[in-house]
Image (cartoon, coloured by chain):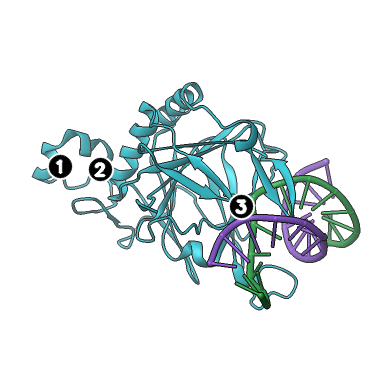
Chain colours: A cyan, B purple, C green
Amino acid sequence: MENFVNQSPSKRLCISDVLTSPRKKIKVEYGEEMTEEEDEDAVLAEFSHPVPWQKIEAEGLDLDYALLFSKEEADHLFKKLEEEVMYSTGEEAKVQVFGKVYNIPRRQATYGDAGLSYTYSGMKHLACTWTPTLEYIRDAVTKTTGHTFNFVLVNRYKDGQDHIGEHRDDEKELDPLCPIASVSLGAARDFVCRHRDARGKQSCRQIEPVKLKLAHGSLLLMNQPTNTFWYHSLPVRKKVLLPRINLTFRRILLNK
DNA sequence: GACCAGGCATGAGT
DNA sequence: CACTCATGCCTGGT
């Protein structure tokens, strides 16, 4: 546990904890200065309260972590997603690894702008049209980060047995200028990142893995060039008994 | 018992 | 064409 990144909320905020909002930089301290611009825009104001971001950096790794939703709002969003999201079944829920076909150890769904599709792990997935709750969360992420997204991959882990193995989100069809924004709802889960050169028996480098606990209502931004050099996974955690829903918002390049 | 790292030995993508 | 490498499970260590 000792090499987990310290995510204690009591962490003292400092001047470097600054977020670039769509319109301007917002100081992190509470008792923020409200500008005329924000005053006018109630919708923006809803999510432009100072979010205390935590920057997580290592060689070739650049993450931003924050709590985006209160417990109450996150509870509500989780419940709505449980009602709205329809997950893949049958062939769409299988994956081929080392020549063998398996059912994926989680439930998965793809939503996004009309006509979009996303290919990963050799499978092409057509996006369903956005649900109201997915649009709401997407817009909250956009207001907080200044990035727009046209696609979301939904992963539901029913308990600590459900998981995802080490991989990179390095698909060619992703817009390299846009980070992947990962929203967590439900049970907190460990999230492990490993540098590509520190994997395997004859790994050429000794680089410590970066471990995070992704909390209910949190947002993790995976900035460039993280996905070029670092693999990430959500390992099995036998003691976790409750479900978690993860939304990874992405920008897919058109006409690809 | 929980967790982790390595092996897998086929096949798709570049 | 000759590579690289895998969003999975299993096994044997700690």
Label 1 to label 3, Cα distance in Å? 38 Å
* Secondary structure state at the residue bearing disc 3: strand
- The answer to whether the residues at label 2 and label 1 have Cβ atoms under 8 Å apart is yes
Q: Is residue A207 visible?
A: no
Is residue A110 visible in the rendered structure shown here?
yes
Find residue A48 and name its label.
Answer: 2
Tell me which numbered mark, 1 or 3, is placed earlier along the sequence: 1
Are the numbered discs 3 and 2 placed on the same chain, yes or no? yes
Q: Residues within 10 Å of mark 2 (few under 14, many from 20)?
A: some
Q: Quadrant of residue A195?
A: bottom right
Q: Is residue A209 above or below residue A73?
A: below
Q: Is residue A23 left or right of residue A247?
A: left
Q: Which residue is nearer to you in this view: A159 or A1?
A: A159
Residue extending farthest top: A83
Disc 1 target residue: A38
Q: Indicate which label's residue lies in the foreground, 1 or 3.
A: 3
**In the rendered image, which quarter contains the N terminus of chain A?**
bottom right
Closer to the chain start, of discs 3 and 2, is 2
Residue extending farthest to the left is A36
| Residue drawn at point x = 29 percent, y = 52 percent | A28
Location of residue B9 by image quarter = bottom right
The verdict on a common chain for dots 1 and 3 is yes
Q: Nearer the viewer, residue A13 or A239?
A: A239
Instruction: Report the chain holding disc 3.
Output: A
Kind of residue at badge 2 = Ser
Residue A233 is labelled as 3
Q: Give the residue at x 33% y 58%.
A: A17
